Image (tube, rainbow, N blue to C red):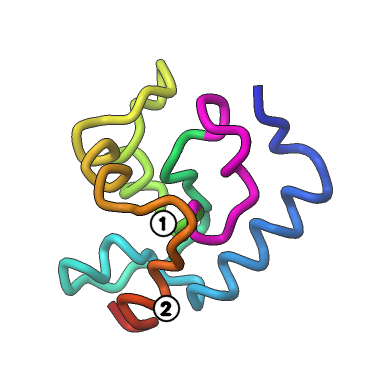
Amino acid sequence: MFDYGKSKWKKKRLHILRLDGYKDRIAAMYGRTEEATIVHHIYPADAYPEYAMCDWNLISVSMRTHNMLENRKTGELTEMGRRLMERTVPGVDWRRNHGRNH
C-alpha cells in the first residue's frame, strides 16, 4: 500500500500542484477552471509502484474530478480513469507533449 503520509510524497505532491498551477488538468481539457487540491496517480501506485513518484504519472485534479477517476470505496479506476491511463504513455512527459495550457 502506497504511503501517502511520507514527507517524500508530500514534497512530490506539492511539486505537481505547483507544476500544474493548482489547476485541475482534466477539467481544463473540457474548458472548465477548477482548483486542484489532489494529485492523482494515472497508473495506480499500488499496482505500478515503479511509477508512483514519476511526474508523468501524476496529475493535479479537484476532488470532484478525482471521484470521477477513481471509485473512492474500492480504490479501483473508473472507466474515465482507465481511459486516462490507456492514453498516458509510461515515461512520456504529457505536460511537455500537450503543452501546459491543455
Extreme residue toward the left, this view: 30
Q: Point out the image quarter for the N terminus.
A: top right
Q: Which amino acid, mark 2?
A: Arg
Q: In which quarter of the image is residue 93?
A: bottom left
Q: Point out the image quarter for the C terminus.
A: bottom left
Extreme residue toward the right, this view: 7
Q: Does the magenta stretch include residue 65?
A: no
Residue drawn 45% across the image and 58% down it? 59
In the rendered view, does 53 fall on the left or right side of 90?
right
Question: Mark 2 to mark 1: distance in Å?
Answer: 18 Å
Q: How many marks?
A: 2
Q: Residue 96 carries which label?
A: 2
Query: Do the numbered discs 2 and 1 sit on residues whose CB atoms are within 8 Å?
Result: no
Q: Which mark is residue 31?
A: none
Residue drawn 49% across the image and 44% down it? 41
In this view, 50 is above or below 17: above
Residue 17 percent coordinates (x, y): 56, 67
**Helix, strand or loop for disc 1:** strand
In the rendered view, does 7 fall on the left or right side of 47?
right
Q: Quadrant of residue 12?
A: bottom right
Residue drawn 53% across the image and 32% down it? 48
Identify the magenta region: 45-57
Answer with mark 2 or mark 1, whichever residue precedes in sequence.
1
Which residue bears the numbered disc 1?
61
Residue 65 percent coordinates (x, y): 32, 49
Q: Nearer the viewer, residue 2 or 93?
A: 93
Q: Which amino acid, mark 1?
A: Val
Residue 73 percent coordinates (x, y): 41, 18
Residue drawn 33% across the image and 53% down it? 88
